[in-house]
Amino acid sequence: MKFRKPLNMLEGEKRQNKALEKAVEEDKNFVVCESCKKRLKTEELNKNWFVCSYCGNHFRIGARDRIFRLADVSSFCEMFDDLRSFNILGFEGYDKKLASARESGEEEAVITGVGSINGNKTAIFAMEPNFMMGSMGSTVGERITRLFEYAIKERLPVVGFSVSGGARMQEGILSLMQMAKTSGAVKKHSLEGLFFLSILTNPTTGGVTASFASLGDIIIAEPGALIGFAGPRVIEQTIRKKLPVGFQRAEFIIQKGFIDAIVERTQQKEFISELLKMHSDKKQTAAGKAVKETVKEKPKETLNETVITPKDETKEYVVAVLEQPERITANALVARPASPKARTKSKLAGARNTDRPASGTKAQQLTKEAISREITKEAVVNGSNGSN
Ligand SMILES: [Zn+2]
């Protein structure tokens, strides 16, 4: 008997999307709705923001298309698009994956910039489902962090659309670190009294749900969106119980208080602009006007003095970018009164770091040094000298 791995929800959708693509290929004028199986005119679907007029199914749309529909005409200006991912850890097959993801026409899994929505100036990010399912690598984290830092500086609200399969495993711990980095930036933005509206689309999972996507002052979701951390299959296997119908869907989690509202895509522009109007910052209104006049031209200034250009794409440089002194550090995050358990842990970490000889490429060593520096610092904070 052949054993077949059951498909999880995300894989199922991927398969459906392929069927959809095939249908489009066969007849470009019609698309079959993956939910109600009705044939829809592509043109009408496009007019209806890619929402099925029969069953309300929200088709997946790309980040650029989403921003184009949402932002006022020619108001959006992309920023930080000079930051690109590359295979920093030398992970097998990652280069190939990146190359095929770039066939989508996007360079990264998130688009960041500034624009206005019904005249309300705002920082905007939208994640790209066609680029490695919106997975969060160090560039995604860096673009989002820089956007929040820019928003703090310009006293702008942030409107962010999430769609993600989670952290990008090909970047190992560097991708996990983005959770802390982005969360730190969101917190700073919040402490400034600025508004962050998080919009969760189908699917928002893993490290993205577990960081910035869940940190909005108001969190809304699109109908039917799958929102969670681990997939339902993993949860079922862990708790050995059947999960309820509709588990992790927007309509289910709103009853648990996880999100504030479910808003259909066609209603989003009005809904978002109303919220922006309500929560606009007085100081921002003056500054916002000034930015509005220059918005057609791409803002050259970024918070960091140096900008990564393709030429600068050295591994050493990226490591340096990841370690910006003004950002919240892992050390600060773990700084807390030492418990006996934490002391033992950091002693072990310290011992591992001194015993093991350094290996790998120069960049890997640099990364290792950076990590071991953090761990050593943590050990000091927790009351151990880290060398045991
Ligand atoms: Zn339908």
Image (spheres, rainbow, N blue to C red):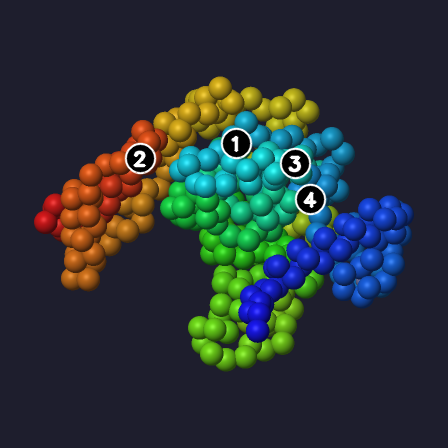
Say which amino acid is labelled 4. Answer: Gly
Per the rendering, the mark at residue 360 is 2
Quadrant containing the N terminus is: bottom right
Whole-angstrom CA distance, mark 3 to mark 4, is: 13 Å
**Which of pointers 3 and 4 lies earlier in the amino acid sequence?**
4
- SS at mark 4 in the image: loop
**What percent of the width, then of the height, locates residue 235?**
49, 70
Whole-angstrom CA distance, mark 1 to mark 3, is: 14 Å
Per the rendering, the mark at residue 84 is 1
**Which of pointers 1 and 2 lies earlier in the amino acid sequence?**
1
Whole-angstrom CA distance, mark 2 to mark 4, is: 38 Å
The number of numbered discs placed on residues in the rendered structure image is: 4
Q: Nearer the viewer, residue 302 or 277?
A: 302
- SS at mark 3 in the image: helix
- Label 1 or label 3, whichever lies nearer to me, is 3
Q: Nearer the viewer, residue 318 or 9?
A: 9
In the image, 350: left or right of 43? left
Q: Which residue is mark 3?
A: 103
**What percent of the width, then of the height, locates residue 147?**
52, 37
**What percent of the width, then of the height, locates residue 291?**
61, 28
Say which amino acid is labelled 3. Answer: Glu
Res. 251 image quadrant: bottom right
Res. 224 image quadrant: bottom right
- Do callouts 3 and 4 mark residues in contact (Cβ within 8 Å)? no
Whole-angstrom CA distance, mark 1 to mark 4, is: 18 Å
